[in-house]
Every structure is written in structure tokens, then in C-alpha cells.
């Protein structure tokens, strides 16, 4: 190559390529001829290099998202377990969990329904038509089912 660019200029072209991925835009931004950009694009294999970087970045983003989702599901399940314990305790104490409290109607059972829906949402499953009407049969099933497992 007769007019080899400096390492700094090549790095400037590479940075511009990452931003634009367009020969003419890189040439304009860096003040070089478009043929110079094309030459270094091929010589330095910028397309392959950038594709590799994007793939790694996407893989890391996917992993980070999966990790965060798993942590969220773990928290929801822990809260759900504690709520079920509270429901069992209230039931053992003879508390009518379904008595109407104007300030908090269906507070515990509604919270459990919300947690179930949140868990399903985090797991990517449908959240509609999974709710329950509340009432003793559902709570009895949940609280007794936990002891039998």
C-alpha cells in the first residue's frame, strides 16, 4: 500500500465503522476517500470483527437478562412461600381470612393471586385465566398441598 494510514487513523476509521457501518459516512466523518475505507474494511475484516462483537454482546445481554429473571423468580417464590405460611398460621389460629375488611378486602388471597400471576409472567407464561375466585377451598388446597409434598 502506497499511502498506508497511521495506526491512530485506522483506529479512527474502525471506530467510525462501528458507529455507521457505511463506507461513505465513515469516509466523510474521517476525511478520507471512500476507497480508503473500503480497503481497510476488507484488510482489517471489520464486518467479521463487528459481527463477532455484536454476537458476544448479545450473548452477554441475554445471559444478564436470564440471570436477572432467575433472581426475580427466586424472590417471588420466597415471598409466595412466606405468604402461604402466613395463610396457614392464620388458618390454624381460626382467623377468617375471607371476612370482609373494608380497608383490605381479600388482602392475603389477592396478594397470593398477584404473586402467582407475577411468577407466571416472569416465566413467560400466560397470566390470564389463572386467577382464582378465592375462598376456603383454594386456600385449603394451597396450605394442605404444601404439607403433603
Image (cartoon, rainbow, N blue to C red):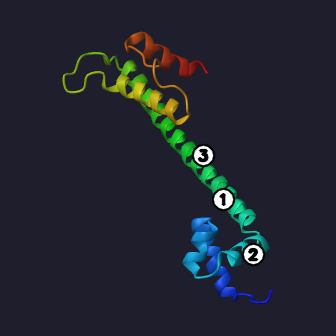
At label 1, counting other C-alpha atoms closer than 10 Å, the crowd grade (few under 14, some 14-19, many 20 or more) is few
Q: Is residue 47 above or below residue 112?
A: below
Residue 135: percent from the left, percent from the top? Answer: 37, 12
Of the two numbered discs 3 and 1 in the rendering, the one whose residue sits closer to the viewer: 1
Q: Is residue 121 above or below residue 141?
A: below
Picture mark count: 3
Q: Is residue 76 above or below residue 41?
A: above
Local SS, label 3: helix
Mark carried by residue 66: 3
Task: Look at mark 1 in the image and give the residue it sits on.
Answer: 54
Residue 34: percent from the left, percent from the top? Answer: 65, 75
Question: Is there a contact, CB below 8 Å, between mark 3 and mark 1?
Answer: no
Of the two numbered discs 1 and 2 in the rendering, the one whose residue sits closer to the viewer: 2
For the residues labelled 3 and 1, the Cα–Cα distance comes to 18 Å
Q: Residue at x 49, y 41 (%)?
A: 75
Q: Residue at x 31, y 26 (%)?
A: 107
Task: Look at mark 2 in the image and give the residue it sits on.
Answer: 39
Q: Residue at x 70, y 76 (%)?
A: 35
At label 3, counting other C-alpha atoms closer than 10 Å, the crowd grade (few under 14, some 14-19, many 20 or more) is few
Relative horizontal placement of residue 145, taking residue 63 as reference (left or right): left
Q: Quadrant of the C terminus?
A: top right
**Residue 105 visible:** yes
Residue 137 occupies quadrant: top left
Of the two numbered discs 3 and 2 in the rendering, the one whose residue sits closer to the viewer: 2
For the residues labelled 3 and 2, the Cα–Cα distance comes to 40 Å
Q: Nearer the viewer, residue 148 or 116?
A: 116
Q: Nearer the viewer, residue 5 or 132?
A: 5
For the residues labelled 1 and 2, the Cα–Cα distance comes to 22 Å
Local SS, label 2: helix
**Residue 85 visible:** no
Give the mark nearer the N terminus: 3 vs 1: 1
Amino acid at each position: 500500500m502506497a499511502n498506508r494510514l497511521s495506526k491512530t487513523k485506522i483506529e479512527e476509521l474502525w471506530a467510525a465503522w462501528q458507529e455507521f457501518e457505511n463506507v461513505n459516512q465513515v469516509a466523510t466523518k474521517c476525511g478520507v476517500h471512500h476507497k480508503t475505507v473500503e480497503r481497510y474494511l476488507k484488510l482489517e475484516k471489520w464486518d467479521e470483527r463487528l459481527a463477532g462483537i455484536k454476537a458476544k454482546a448479545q450473548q452477554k445481554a441475554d445471559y444478564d437478562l436470564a440471570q436477572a429473571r432467575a433472581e426475580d423468580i427466586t424472590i417471588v417464590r420466597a415471598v409466595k412461600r412466606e405468604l402461604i405460611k402466613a395463610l396457614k398460621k392464620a388458618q390454624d389460629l381460626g382467623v377468617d381470612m375471607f371476612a370482609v375488611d373494608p380497608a383490605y378486602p381479600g388482602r392475603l388471597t389477592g396478594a397470593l393471586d398477584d404473586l402467582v400471576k407475577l411468577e407466571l409472567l416472569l416465566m413467560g407464561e400466560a397470566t390470564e385465566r389463572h386467577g382464582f375466585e378465592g375462598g376456603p377451598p383454594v386456600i385449603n388446597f394451597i396450605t394442605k398441598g404444601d404439607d403433603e409434598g
